[in-house]
Amino acid sequence: MLELKFAWALQGGFAPKEIEETVEKWKKMFIDEKFVEVCFDKIRGRGSSSIIYEAVLHTQSPLLITSKIMNGGIITKKQSENNNKNNEKVVIKIVNKFGHDDFEQILREVNAALKIGIHKHICCLLGWSLYLTTHALIYECVDGYDLHTWLKLYANALGLITEMQIAKILWQISDGMEHISAVGIVHRDLAARNILLTKALEIKITDFGLASICNKQFIYQAQINRRLPIRWMAPESLGSRLFSEASDIWSFGVLIWEVFTFGDVPYNTMEEGEDIVDFICSGNTLVLPYKTGQIWQILTRDCWKLNRDERPNFKAIRNLIGQFLEEKTINYGYLRCKSE
């Protein structure tokens, strides 16, 4: 049954060996629909070709099993605590239209999940299923908002979000992205809308529908027939379709701008299209609000270096923000003690 599904979906685009390898990858992540209880009265979201529902998973996640194998049977309790339940609350994305682009997106997410494994700052794809013969993706459930929505809720409540809270959120994102880049994946759609945020302000990076595996030079060259988020894209991605950790770094800079503008649209005075492409490729960048802290002014400037080789990597950014948080915490404790 699975082989027939894949043969139909892959026809014309893959060699027989590639089809065989793809089928084997998909088999590793398959969950029989009898283990999935969909809550059709609890809709989490809608897309152009899918609907996302809450669901209950009545078996262990294939991702957990695969991660154990990849790590030699060793996986920490903390890593697996949310993926080792036989009655786990999850979300399921059921595809209601299934063309070649939809299959390609699902394939990217499954391939990325197998490479990434389990990480506390990444919303894991737990597996996939055939729900009533329709393809469906099953993810861990995150109760809260996406970062963009959360920012909009506070847009008119200045002072309720502190710089420390923002720094903690950005540190978590850089930590998750450092792991993603370390396993050779380029996200290609890093933006506030694709960051899930719990009530405790813990983040999960999501939406790997554009994610790609890099070559040995850690670069991915994209085809031109896909709709891409140009307002978050680096010059080399817009001009030469080159994607790498450095292009994700550029997007991270745009995400920082989103945070400090409380969810504004990048280049919001410009129409989608060639005007934005020309503006970015000419060396122009976004401008942070006047009172934004110096660390974020400098960091975004570095993220938006025209030469991608001059941009920092996610490990360096994570360490920089971590040091900022450490210094702020130490200073806060010292000042509080002095005032007492």
Image (spheres, rainbow, N blue to C red):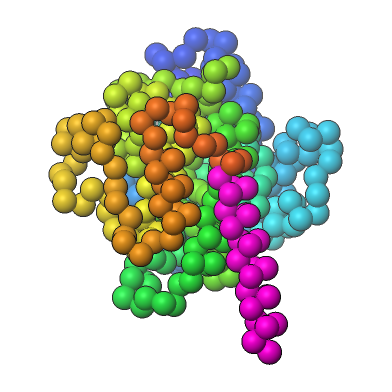
Q: Nearer the viewer, residue 40 or 330?
A: 330
User: Magenta region: which residues?
Assistant: 317-340
State left or right for residue 307 relative to residue 200: left
Q: Nearer the viewer, residue 295 or 240?
A: 295
- Indicate whether 170 appears above or below 4: below
State left or right for residue 16 relative to residue 336: left
Question: Where is residue 80 drawn, in percent x and y?
Answer: 75, 52
Report the residue at 49% width, 10% height from top. Answer: 15
Q: Is residue 119 magenta?
A: no
Labels in figure, total: 0
Report the residue at 35% width, 26% height from top. Answer: 236
Viewer can see residue 240: yes
- Indicate whether 223 appears above or below 161: above
Q: Farthest residue to the front: give it.
A: 338
Report the residue at 39% width, 65% height from top. Answer: 151
Q: Nearer the viewer, residue 209 or 25?
A: 209
Report the residue at 64% width, 78% height from top. Answer: 335
Looking at the figure, which quarter contains the C terminus? Answer: bottom right
Question: Where is residue 334 drawn, in percent x and y?
Answer: 68, 75
Viewer can see residue 46: no
Residue 154 appears in which quarter of the rendering?
Answer: bottom left
Question: Where is residue 57 drawn, in percent x and y?
Answer: 64, 55
State left or right for residue 91 relative to residue 330: left
Q: Farthest residue to the right: give it.
A: 73
Question: Where is residue 337 drawn, in percent x and y?
Answer: 70, 82
State left or right for residue 170 relative to residue 88: left
For the stretch drawn in magenta, what is the main secondary structure?
A: helix
Residue 20 appears in which quarter of the rendering?
Answer: top right
Looking at the figure, which quarter contains the N terminus? Answer: top right
